[in-house]
Image (cartoon, rainbow, N blue to C red):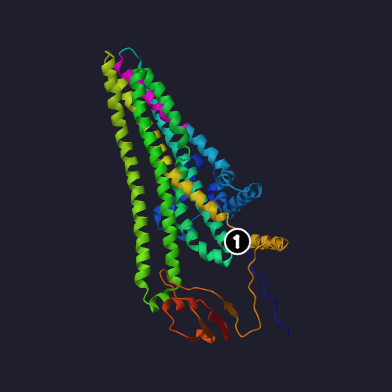
Amino acid sequence: MSSPPNPTPAPSPPTPQSPYDTASFWSHTSFSYVHDLLVLGYSRPLLKSDLPSLPSHDSSTKLSSKLQSTWDHQRSISSTPSLTKAIYSAHKFEFWLAGVWTILEHICMLLQPLLLSLFLNFLTSTTSPSSTGYIYAFLLFLTSFLQAIFHHQTYYITMRAGWNLRISLTILTHSKLLKLNLTESSQYAGVAMNLVSNDVFRFDNFCPAIWHYFTGPADGVAILFLLTKELNFPPAFLGIIIVLFDVFLKLYLGKKIGSVRSTTSKLTDARVTRTGELLNGIETVKSYNWDGVFKGILRGLREREHESIFRSQFMKGINFSMVLATPAVASLAMFGLYNAMYEEPLTIERVLGCIALINVLRTSIGKEMSRATENGPECYIAVKRFERFLGLDETEEKSKDDDAGDDDDESSSTTTISFSSSSSLLEIDNASFTWPKCTDNLSSKIVKKPKGNVIMYSTRDVDSTEMAALNTIPTTLQDITLSLK
């Protein structure tokens, strides 16, 4: 009697399309495509099954393959590939779209002080019709409303670019680590861990501020022109000079923050690597009571790392304090010089309009551009660290290089390991296994039995350093003899 055929498994249901992919232009602009999810979350706690699918352009597979493709292209066309160019090629559309939204936002920011001055002039005038005031009030509302829309679109696109870069570079780092040979994989495991746990978050901080490198100086020129119309050139120029001094101070501090960040990254790499080595050899460390030595090493690295982080945070604190102090100092200098040079009194509408322009400059240069100068150097250091790691030779590449090297001249220097038919599996001559400030060498003959049992024949006592060397011999090998001469 024949058994019934196995039933064909039912096909899995298709993945529902993301609401973002099916949303209209207005839904994208107002973010109304998440309305149903917000209503559901208000009525009851959300479950995992309630979450919609990711947008197609946010798929981790698509993101990583796109960046991997542009990085491979950079490696194929240049001996010194640039990860920055690869990132730009992979996210070119998002970069320029964010630029359009940012420029529109800053146009609205500059229009609001002008409309405010016109509205205040209308309030102090007794001859202007009421319709003029309504028009100015409506334009003030419209520019403020449009600025809010442009601002949220800018930040959504740039923040999404930041976390997409974080995801794709994490995947590329993991893939690269698997392609390294065993020696380099062990050597760079701590570096890879630091890259995916610390450096990737620099993109989240910098991407929302990337266009402020360009809008900050442009706003400065426009505001200088507008202030000159209100207060004449010398007072306006003095106010701008104070703001520019703040900018140059931020640029200097940003450069120093980048240098400190590079030092912090190296110290973190060293600490993570030493910690991994300690955990891998914890049995040996505990057996020979080396806890104090390694604890002192790790404590020293950690203290230096804390000192470097403190320096970075101190400079960031100076940056933030200048954001609050610069508008007040600039206004005092600007209006003080105007009163000293000109007899014409300052009117309330002129003062409020100029203060509004200074506040726009404070937001554009003092806050947004300072964020770019603060996080930009850190992000640049992170990109260079990823670039060095992703540029490491892979196992396949080394194999090709080795095959090509076989055709080289026989006089080139080579190292050969040969196995003879003697009783020793491996012989090492003139080897020294010591800790710093130790001079004794190991000269013993060891027979490793199954399950890692070691029988040692030695002409003298073997210290803990030599035992550490012996413990590196694989314990899974059957009866072998190792001679160290």
Q: Measured from the top left, where is residue 292 in percent x and y?
A: 34, 71
Q: How many marks?
A: 1
Q: Secondary structure at mark 1?
A: loop
Q: Residue at x 31, y 15 (%)?
A: 125
Instruction: Judge whether 2 appears above or below 328 on screen.
Output: below
Q: Which residue is mark 1?
A: 13
Q: Is residue 383 left or right of residue 130?
A: right
Q: Measured from the top left, where is residue 314 in percent x and y?
A: 32, 46
Q: Residue at x 70, y 79 (%)?
A: 4
Q: Residue at x 48, y 37 (%)?
A: 211
Quadrant in the rendering for residue 354? top left
Quadrant in the rendering for residue 293? bottom left
Instruction: Judge whether 465 appears above or below 193 on screen.
Output: below
Q: Nearer the viewer, residue 173 or 285?
A: 285
**Dominant SS in magenta:** helix
Q: Measured from the top left, where is residue 131 in percent x and y?
A: 38, 18
Q: Residue at x 49, y 39 (%)?
A: 29
Q: Which residues are magenta?
A: 104-125
Residue 346 visible at all? no
Residue 138 lies in magenta, yes or no?
no
Q: Nearer the viewer, residue 459 or 171?
A: 459
Q: Nearer the viewer, residue 332 or 278?
A: 278
Q: Residues within 10 Å of mark 1 (few under 14, many from 20)?
A: few
Q: Measured from the top left, where is residue 459 in percent x and y?
A: 47, 86
Quadrant in the rendering for residue 421? bottom right
Quadrant in which the N terminus is drawn: bottom right
Residue 109 lies in magenta, yes or no?
yes
Instruction: Judge whether 249 appears above or below 71 on screen.
Output: above
Q: Nearer the viewer, residue 449 or 374?
A: 449
Quadrant in which the C terminus is drawn: bottom right
User: Looking at numbered disc 1 in the image, what kind of residue is underneath it?
Assistant: Pro
